[in-house]
Amino acid sequence: MKSVGKTIVVFCVLGFLIILIHFKYNYIYYGRLGKSMLTQRSNRGNDNAVRQCRYVFLDLGSNKGVQVRKLFEPNLYPNASIIPVFDRVFGNISERQRYVCAFGFEANPRHMKRLIFIEKSYKNKGFQVDFYHLAVSDRDNDRVTIFSETNFDLDWGAGILDQAINNKANMTKYKVHTVDIVRFIVEIINPLKSKAVFMKMDIEGSEYLLLPHMIKNKILCKDIITSAGIEFHEWARIPLNTSLDLSKFKQNLNLQSCVPTSVIPLDDESYNLDVVINSDS
């Protein structure tokens, strides 16, 4: 009986070690919580749409969703400077309503109700749109503090720094999960094999963390990200202790062994309060 008991104990210990090794493998390879909910949702939600993603619009810093709306409903935003870029990269409105997949990321939770409404409305119209309440980062499954403006109508500087927030006495703080945008592009965007990927980046200073990470991982290559419109926030350089600016970024971009992503000078802040969203829109 003693030998049987010892055998049981040995098997229990071995079983525990196997489980522990499996957990550590998943922790290292997939991140703290295993394969991220982001990846699971994207795979599940886009299984039937993968073949239709002839083009991709990657919207980093969606705010109220205005740029995605300009993509699919340009008639509501006459003279917006980003629309000719959409026409050039994605084709005419009929082409992009059918074949563009838009992925938007927004860290500020105050915008999510509106973004989810836009997503559902657009999907009902056959437009392929997904918004994620995640802070784009160089790390996966982390949590960061997001500082937000108290006045919602002026809430354009929300991010990991509070420098752009006017009323710090009543400043709002949120804890938000991060997504490693490199991993998202590798796991979700690359398998789509799209003809063109356009990335818009307006993330209130986080670009100084993200862009070196993307260059290091060979993401800012034309065969991965075709073109990009990136806004550099000069006020964020000192608190983030970085010497990176647009000029140095372009130098680093051209030092890559690949054909670099085309960087488009673009800062379209038109219609920042958006237009009315119709119930069938």
Image (cartoon, grey):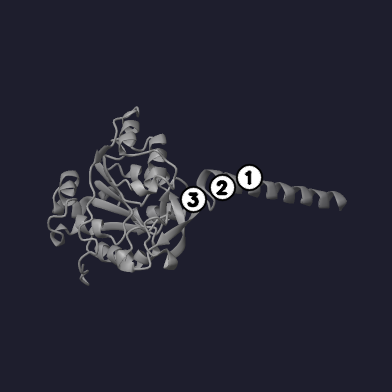
- Amino acid type, label 3: Lys
Q: Secondary structure at mark 3?
A: loop
Q: Secondary structure at mark 2?
A: helix
Q: Work out whether mark 2 precedes mark 1 in sequence or the reverse, and give the earlier one.
A: 1
Whether residue 48 is visible here, answered yes or no, is: no
Q: Work out whether mark 2 precedes mark 3 in sequence or the reverse, and give the earlier one.
A: 2
In the rendered image, residue 143, in percent from the top left (x then y), is placed at 49, 55
Residue 85 is left or right of residue 113, and the answer is left
Q: Which mark is residue 8?
A: none
Query: Dot 1: within a 10 Å radius of its alpha carbon, few (fewer than 14), some, or many (20 or more) residues?
Result: few
Location of mark 3 (residue): 35
Location of mark 2 (residue): 27
Q: Secondary structure at mark 1?
A: helix
Residue 12 is left or right of residue 128, and the answer is right
Query: Dot 2: within a 10 Å radius of its alpha carbon, few (fewer than 14), some, or many (20 or more) residues?
Result: some
Residue 271 is left or right of residue 210, and the answer is left
Q: Residue at x 49, y 52 (%)?
A: 141
Determine whether label 1 and label 3 are within 8 Å by CB.
Answer: no
Q: Residue at x 56, y 47 (%)?
A: 27
In the rendered image, residue 104, in percent from the top left (x then y), is placed at 32, 55
In three-dimensional space, the C-alpha distance between marks 1 and 3, rounded to whole angstroms, equals: 16 Å
- Amino acid type, label 1: Ile
Whether residue 58 is visible here, answered yes or no, is: yes
Location of mark 1 (residue): 21
Q: Work out whether mark 1 precedes mark 3 in sequence or the reverse, and give the earlier one.
A: 1
Near-viewer residue (185 or 177): 177
- Amino acid type, label 2: Tyr
In three-dimensional space, the C-alpha distance between marks 2 and 3, rounded to whole angstroms, equals: 9 Å
